[in-house]
Image (cartoon, helix red, strand yellow):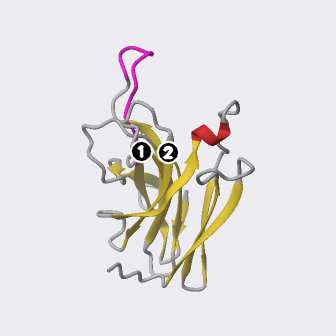
Amino acid sequence: MASDPTDPNVLYIVYHDFDEAPQDPEDDADVDVYLIRGEYNSQSEEWEWSERIRINDDDPDVEHDQFFPTIVVDDYGDLHIAWFDTRNDPQGPDDDVLISLFYAFSNDGGETFTNHEIDEVAIDTLVLQQNDFIGDYIRITMADDAVVIVYNATGLLVPWPFTVYVEQIHSARIVWE
């Protein structure tokens, strides 16, 4: 959850959820990252909420999982979101062995997003072996005009299962080439 420093009446919430809940609990489901935008209406004294907006831009017909989203809004009102993502796992959507770190940017209040892969192999679940616990959270914040993402990762073949990584994306007004 993040408030917009350019408008104190605007609040953003990101979360992961099923695209559609599976009918059979044994079936896999497509888990996506969503954003809802709340705007406080001072006349009615109630929050008005948008429809949810899907953030991840992978093929919605392929069951890849996106999860643990985190959000920050910079001083310009631009949204920055990071999450774990299995879309590029070469094992395919049934295994979800390799988990990447993705980032999305919006400069139009969350109407549209541009997705970028930040770490191709943030977590290799085979490295964990007996321990399936991959950690809980990702954190994102602003430091001057830079987006800073802190996350846990295994990478490939690291000697100990987890290392904490910090990614810094310079300039809040990001231009991707």
Tell me which residue sits at (47%, 78%) in the image. Answer: 6
The location of residue 88, given as percent across then percent down, is 38, 49
Residue furthest to the right in view is: 160
Query: For residue 24: magenta?
Result: yes
Q: Residues within 10 Å of mark 1 (few under 14, many from 20)?
A: some
Q: Secondary structure at mark 2?
A: strand
Whether 175 is drawn above or below 63: the answer is: below
Give the image quarter of residue 174: bottom left
Assign the N terminus to one quadrant of the image. Answer: bottom right
> Does residue 94 appear left or right of residue 131 in this picture?
left
- Label 1 SS: loop
Q: 125 or 48, which is in the foreground?
A: 125
Q: Which residues are magenta?
A: 22-33
Residues at marks 1 and 2 touching, judged by CB atoms closer than 8 Å: yes
Residue beneath disc 2 = 98
Residue beneath label 1, please? 89
